[in-house]
Image: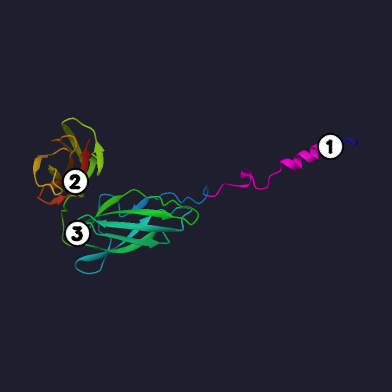
Amino acid sequence: MRILKPTMWLLLLVVMTACPGSKDDGPEEGDMGDPGSVSLVFPENNSECTEGDTVNDQQSAITFQWQTSENADSYEVNVKNLENGDAQVTESLSNEATLTLNSNTPYEWYVTTSSEDSETAPKSATWKFYNAGEGVVNYAPFPAEALYPSRGGTISVNTSVALEWKGDDVDNDIVEFEVFFGTEANPTVSIGSTTENAITANVISGQTYYWQVKTEDAIGNTSISEIFNFKVE
């Protein structure tokens, strides 16, 4: 019988264990190309935007700007009118996009990032601003945002819940909030006014509740939030 020398055994072992398609050859599909979320730049959060180009007496063109993402192929700019809920969506291949908006109107905006090498589309923070109008010296507050209970959420409580919200104003002169609450989809019953960002409401198990916040500033300007809802277990 022929006996293989040690060097030949070693060579055979290397050939048998080699694996050209192993994970060590490079990153798995999906590990590269995630674009990541971007940081917004302009219009600034909770600001009065006065730098738009006038289109007519009621509109101006605003150029939105954000920081670029290293792996991004495109961006999607989402802008929402906070008075009527109308939304505009536009795609951009750079880090800016110009949209025509109503003057003297509150808006919110955010940007999602896309890459051909990734299935994810990360979303930036959401910022709010007022598109300035000629002759306006004081702006109405931004519509309040629900903090707790979260919109459409389900909570477990006994007899009451502390409704919490966030209110912002360009002029920083909010004087009070009035809260409308009930089991009707369009709540009309006021449960009180407060200078705080919370108020207590009585609830019972098994019910779905709807609530809305009216914000008023020092010279009488008001805004009304969207209608929020939650269910009590």
User: Which residue lies at the image location 31% right of the left edge and 63% below the top edge?
Assistant: 99
Q: Kindly report the distance in space between the C-alpha atoms of the residues bearing marks 3 and 1.
A: 84 Å
Residue 150 seen in render? no
Instruction: Say which element carries label 2.
Output: loop
Horizontal side of residue 215 vs 114, given as left or right: left
Does 80 appear in magenta? Answer: no
Horizontal side of residue 51 vs 171, given as left or right: right
Does 17 appear in magenta? Answer: yes
Query: Which circle's residue, 2 or 1, is located before the other in the chain?
Result: 1
Q: To which residue does mark 2 refer?
A: 172
| Region of the chain picked out in magenta, as a range | 8-29
Query: Which circle's residue, 3 or 1, is located before the other in the chain?
Result: 1
**Closer to us: mark 3 or mark 1?**
1
Say which amino acid is labelled 2.
Asn
Say which amino acid is labelled 1.
Thr
The colour scheme used here is: rainbow
Which sits in the foreground, 124 or 41?
Answer: 124
Residue 75 locus on image (x, y percent): 40, 58
Residue extending farthest to the top is 158
Residue extending farthest to the front is 1
Dividing the image into 4 quarters, which one contains the C terminus? top left
Residue extending farthest to the bottom is 56
When the figure is inspected, residue 156 is found, relative to residue 112, above or below; the finding is: above
**Closer to us: mark 2 or mark 1?**
1
What is the number of the mark on residue 7? 1
Residue 177, picture quadrant: top left
Say which amino acid is labelled 3.
Asn
What is the number of the mark on residue 104? 3
Q: Kindly report the distance in space between the C-alpha atoms of the residues bearing marks 3 and 2.
A: 17 Å
Horizontal side of residue 31 vs 195, given as left or right: right
